[in-house]
Amino acid sequence: MGIVNYIKESFVELQNNVSWMPREEAQKNTVLVAVFTVIFAIAVFLVDKFFQAGLEKYFNIFN
């Protein structure tokens, strides 16, 4: 019963003792994080393609 009691008390604490941001603000922040995640993923992709092209040119010198 220890784990069940722990989970119940955790939910009570989350409901009563944690201050949550308003739903609208949470939605805006979620969209903002998603947009920056996509931008960062595109940037990493472009850097990866740049280095891939550079390394292919470098190794083709020795063929």
Image (cartoon, rainbow, N blue to C red):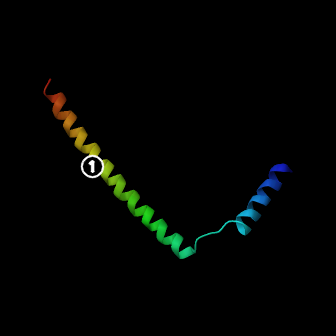
The residue under label 1 is which amino acid type? Leu
List x then y, in percent, for residue 42: 32, 54
Number of numbered markers: 1
- Classify 45 as above or below 51: below
| Foreground of the two, 7 or 62 | 7
Figure quadrant of residue 23: bottom right
- Classify 22 as above or below 5: below
Figure quadrant of residue 37: bottom left
Image point (47%, 71%), residue name: 28
| Foreground of the two, 17 or 61 | 17
List x then y, in percent, for residue 45: 31, 48
On the rendered image, what quadrant is the C terminus found in? top left
Image point (15%, 29%), residue name: 60
In this picture, residue 58 sits left or right of residue 14: left
Image point (20%, 39%), residue name: 53
Residue position marked by numbered label 1 in the rendering: 46
- Classify 13 as above or below 44: below
In this picture, residue 40 sits left or right of residue 28: left
| Foreground of the two, 22 or 4 | 22
In the image as oriented, which residue stretches furthest toward the top?
A: 62
Image point (32%, 48%), residue name: 44
Secondary structure beneath dot 1 equals helix
List x then y, in percent, for residue 19: 65, 68
List x then y, in percent, for residue 21: 58, 71
In this picture, residue 30 sits left or right of residue 7: left
